[in-house]
Amino acid sequence: MDTQPLYRRLANRYLDAIKAGSLARGDKMPSVRELMRLHDVSLTTALQLCRHLENEGWLEARPRSGYFVRHPRRLPLAPTREPNPALPLDPAAFVGIQARVSHFVAQGQRYPIQCNLSGARGAPSLYPHAQLNLIASRLLRKHRQLLVSAGTHSGNMALKVALARRAVASGMTLAPTDILVTHGCIEALNLALRAVTKPGDTIAVESPTFYGLLQVLESLGLRALEIPTSPQTGLSIDALELAIRSHDSIKAVVVVPHLQNPLGSIMPDAHKQRLVELCMQQGIPLIEDDTYTALTNSDIPLLALKHWDKTGNVIHCASLHKTLAPGMRLGWIAAGRWHDQVEMLKYAQSRHNEEWSQLTAAEFMNSAAYDRHLRRLRHTLRAQREQMAEAVAQYFPAGTRLVVPEGGLMLWVELPEPISGSRLFEDALQAGILIAPGTLFSNLIRFETYIRLNCGLPFTTEVEHTIRRLGKLAENHLPR
Amino acid sequence: MDTQPLYRRLANRYLDAIKAGSLARGDKMPSVRELMRLHDVSLTTALQLCRHLENEGWLEARPRSGYFVRHPRRLPLAPTREPNPALPLDPAAFVGIQARVSHFVAQGQRYPIQCNLSGARGAPSLYPHAQLNLIASRLLRKHRQLLVSAGTHSGNMALKVALARRAVASGMTLAPTDILVTHGCIEALNLALRAVTKPGDTIAVESPTFYGLLQVLESLGLRALEIPTSPQTGLSIDALELAIRSHDSIKAVVVVPHLQNPLGSIMPDAHKQRLVELCMQQGIPLIEDDTYTALTNSDIPLLALKHWDKTGNVIHCASLHKTLAPGMRLGWIAAGRWHDQVEMLKYAQSRHNEEWSQLTAAEFMNSAAYDRHLRRLRHTLRAQREQMAEAVAQYFPAGTRLVVPEGGLMLWVELPEPISGSRLFEDALQAGILIAPGTLFSNLIRFETYIRLNCGLPFTTEVEHTIRRLGKLAENHLPR
Ligand SMILES: Cc1ncc(COP(=O)(O)O)c(C=O)c1O
Ligand SMILES: Cc1ncc(COP(=O)(O)O)c(C=O)c1O
């Protein structure tokens, strides 16, 4: 049985036609109305079909003329290599990341930085400041005592309603009261881990994973067991299954199913479903980090792990911080079976969030302007990622590998041996450039040849020069 | 050697004169100018002298006429009893407070509440919303990308400068970089405890203490050793010394030196100094919770424990939440020797605070309006506390005891036996009144006959009726 939605099946047929040459580059696609008639489908399906092919790079929309066939640009770079499945699973190791991050941060502060490509953040210009300012100022005029009234425990109801409503598109059925508002996704992850583990426990995480998570684990006294993760399809479920069989003490699994940091990988639905079922059967809490999902190329939302959760075993952690407003520390958690515990922990850890930011976010999220903002953000980020990737292809040494992710804020770049990401980091620093060395993203020594580049900045000539400079610095590491 | 400041010594002389009758009720006090001449003192000292006597209730200021002698109202109530020093120190007990608080909260939600006296919070009308709104809106116009720009790690520098500047008055010498901004004092306490303890450790706390702290301890897997605490002078240093001698495993001491919650006690300077030295000598980190200090009757700031700290052994935790704006979750920590560790923990736990509220607070704190606000707040709270205390004296059963604290938001009321605070809580609930039963404030069963009443609300006839109603309900518990 074909479980793909109708628009995807139709899109595949058009894709076959394009690849076979029967729809050539520059040809006009049938109009949306024609598609409706031709395939006897709804307006929505016809639109989804076109948008999907547009998102995949096979169509381009020309204002007032319709969709035209194009061919996605192909980078002259090989994709990042898949993890070696034969590598022995490292025994649960205490993370020692704090010292490494401290060193990284301290280094970054020792030099004047001209171009910072080390973060995973969007430039302020990507976000709707004018609309948010308008809403926030209006709220202060309307609720004059907003800044001097204590907020509501577990979060403002208007925001929770807005979040629950939007969660539907990701396949989650949540009541507003299933949601707790947090200070960013990082607080949500802290609470989730505190609810399901105790110090000394072993947690399975992706390898590589973002150093923020490794810091959380270290600060809570937890051990990280790193599971091989594909730059394309994310966490290897086979490897996880093996790990569960050989380490009977895995107390939680933390996964970023969409636009994983740093890889940018997206787990296929079948993997997600298998993961949820595996964790449920094994009685291992599954913590889902959904920070980047709204930043995918496609406007059609991906299904959250929580979609397949039937027993409350999935703890969904999310954030508006990278999607809506980097100046507002808003995250949320739907903690399933652990809701009450997490609520108590949140209260004991930091009390409620501030009301003004929650109300501002709620009002904006309930307007059509939010969807317009997201569409614009996705398109801009996509363009920036592609430009960055092309610059890397152009300026970095032969043998450099990368996969351009289907969304998000970053590129994970594999350098040809023997170039060391850490040494490139040090050299770049002295040139006023900050990048994130691969070694930050794991406790193991497997990512020495990687770096992560932020694509959240507008791709200016300055950024292009920076990439060229980095490429030169990397060349210097090659034997002559 | 008399270590009291000059104004205090002079004030005592006038107090003697008042008590001896040589300055009678209604007499005019010498003017500030006369005082300067008479005693050859500065304007500041003369003013401090008058304000001190005014704060103690012995003078009243009449606009444009000067200060006049009055006699403080004396409540016809005995003071709350001192803790019994002969009681055995309970062995470190795991706190089991979460369940009790959950029950308390759930109960409160089951009934429609008309009058909530259970909190420790001021009414919104006590806080400067108009000025804060003005600053906040202006900031958004001036820094248009404030809501969409990521904040600074460890807190906004303008706020840290304002905090450091104001800390001088409490005898603390802090550089702005010694300070980390947190989500309220509760996050500061979490970070402090996480930095200096590990699960299973025993922490010395005041008995009674606020249940928020007991929740934090329980959520971090810590044991609370409750140290007898005087309703007047706070933590018993003798009892603490004994505890340290008999339990060699005390890993931290948490103290609210000023306006302790729930007692309202204020530690004398000599006790504070002895406490700091004791902890330093014993190598036990001392965590100071300064939440309420700005709410004392007197405008002359009390000295923080950290004032006597020479080795970085005192971790100072504070908050603007009850002082400046209950709608802004701003706290801070000066973590002494543990600064770097706390900084890392804060980053891993919740990242930075939002910039907007920090800038708003900084701007307001740097203006004279903040001092005017504090003076007004202190006076209003004082009046509300006294009115509340008088109502309790009038309506509660004979044998009720209380001490009217020298500041803060609450009254700790000792009911005559065999009245049970928990039963009164239950009966009050059914009458639509929420109070805090004494049993919430300890793990032991010593505070069954106590309740805590919030004085942050304007003392309306509704509140007065509520107190009368509570008095009646309490009477019902007495044997006939
Ligand atoms: C995967 C992932 N989760 C969580 C976070 C932190 O999210 P927030 O800023 O919402 O706390 C980050 C930030 O870099 C991230 O990359
Ligand atoms: C003594 C004490 N410390 C800390 C807190 C929590 O402070 P904040 O609201 O700043 O987190 C409270 C609140 O009731 C308190 O009474």
Image: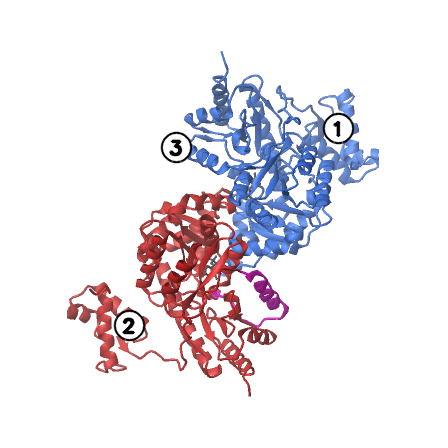
Chain colours: A red, B blue
> Where does the image place residue A252, in percent across and percent down from the top left?
43, 54
Quarter of the picture holding the N terminus of chain B: top right
The label nearer to you, 1 versus 2, is 2
Asked where in the image residue A411 lies, by quadrant, the reply is: bottom left
**First in residue order: circle 3 vs circle 1:** 1
- The chain carrying label 3 is B
Between the residue at mark 3 and the residue at mark 1, the CA separation in whole angstroms equals 55 Å
Q: In the rendered view, does B225 fall on the left or right side of A327? A: right
Whole-angstrom CA distance, mark 1 to mark 2, is 88 Å
Q: Tag 3's secondary structure?
A: helix
Name the one closer to the observer, B372 or A339: A339
Identify residue type, mark 2. Answer: Leu
Residue at the image position 54 percent from the left and 17 percent from the top: B397
Discs 3, 1 touching: Cβ within 8 Å: no
Determine the residue located farthest toward the bottom in the rendered image: A480
> In the current view of this chain or complex, which residue is farthest to the front?
A246
Q: Position of residue A128 (x, y in %)?
A: 43, 61
Using a 10 Å C-alpha cutoff, classify the residue at mark 3 as few (fewer than 14 neighbours), some (14 to 19) or many (20 or more): few
| Secondary structure type for disc 2 | helix
Numbered circle sitting on residue A53 = 2
Q: Where A204 falls versus B299 (above or below)?
A: below
Give the residue type at disc 1: Met
Query: Whole-percent x and y of residue A10?
Result: 21, 70
Disc number placed over residue B110 in the picture, else none: 3
Q: CA distance from mark 3 to mark 2?
A: 54 Å
In the rendered image, is residue A137 in sight?
no
Q: Which disc number belongs to residue B29?
A: 1
Amino acid type, residue under disc 3 in the picture:
Arg
The residue range painted magenta reads A95-123
